Amino acid sequence: MTARAPFQLAALPALSRATAVRDESARKDPDRLDRLWKSGQVILVDRHGRTPVRDAGTALLPRPSAEVAAERPDAALLLGEEADTAYWALPADVELRPTNAPPGAWSLWGGAISDTGEEWHDLRGIGALLDDTAAGLFTTAVGLINWHARSRFCAKCGHPVAPTAAGWSTKCTGCGREEYPRTDPAVICLVHDGADQVLLARQPIWPEHRYSILAGFVETGESLEACVAREIAEEVGIQVTDIGYLGSQPWPFPRSIMIGFTATADPTAPLVPADGEIEHARWIHRAEITAALATGGQTPTLILPGETSIARQMIEGWAATGA
């Protein structure tokens, strides 16, 4: 078999796109924050991570800040500034009924609709449909809201915490301890044979025929490369070599960053899927991957990851090396 040249991501991952300016000094200036609130826009996010959208899920539908609250709420999270507009995020408690996901969306579930006909969709589903600015704002909003929802009490003394710095930190109401948004690193690795086969696997809960590349969380005291080797061995029972970095993507479900790698392995080595975690794993020829990509990412026997995930850009980048 003929070895292929190293490959790159096919494009910047959908959730890595961002244009809004983050200004740490603004977060600590109450007077400036109040001014930014008065003329700002608010991205509402419900408990399922959905936000109002328009144009078939290709654009967000933020609310003018003045319509949400006359004064800046303590829970308001400053996402950044874009074109002289400050964007904020707030959790929303709304009653919605189910609806279908918009065309081109990629999600494990559909969206929701309000009594007035306003559609709400989640980041996993529509992230790749949004432009760079909206994708970055929505990704940041979901990540910050998820962090606050899961970090309401002090890890040191157990007292409730209060948001500070426009939502970019918290302070314990008991001992005064400060805490900052947590991001959990996870590796995701495209394993190939050095030629024309790639290793894909599926979880038991996924729809039939959906496959992706392997991923897992970094453990304490572990390097990223060591995590790659360990996770592949644990999930499918094979050893990998030639581990190399590709790129990264925020993945706020609830608070991760996916760090992409490539590695090679022997396709003749027996695959041993991890019980309860990997339902099936198989080597797939480049021609089958290319056929799926040519038809929007799926064939009757193979469904690839959606464009919201860095996994799709990794697979497209690898497939292109055989062109």
Image: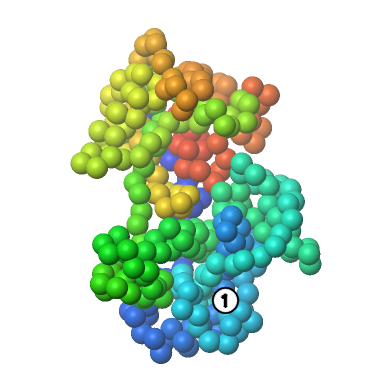
Quadrant position of residue 119: bottom right
**Residue under the image location 58 percent in, 87 percent down:** 70
- The residue tagged with tag 1: helix, strand or loop? strand
**From the viewer's perspective, is residue 262 above or below residue 197?**
below
Is residue 135 toward the left or the right of residue 101 in the image? left
Residue 188 position, x and y percent, is 39, 37
Q: Nearer the viewer, residue 137 or 154?
A: 154
Residue 320 position, x and y percent, is 49, 32
Is residue 217 at all visible to an observer of this figure? yes
Q: Nearer the viewer, residue 128 or 1?
A: 128
Residue 287 position, x and y percent, is 55, 21
**Residue under the image location 35 percent in, 25 percent down:** 234
Residue lying farthest to the left in this orientation: 221
Is residue 211 toward the left or the right of residue 295 in the image? left
Is residue 116 toward the left or the right of residue 160 in the image? right
Quadrant position of residue 118: bottom right
Query: Which quarter of the image is occupied by the N terminus?
Result: top left
Q: What residue did someone put label 1 on?
A: 41
**From the viewer's perspective, is residue 155 above or below residue 38?**
above
Please tell me how crowded label 1 is: few (under 14), some (14-19), or many (20+) other residues with Cα within 10 Å: many
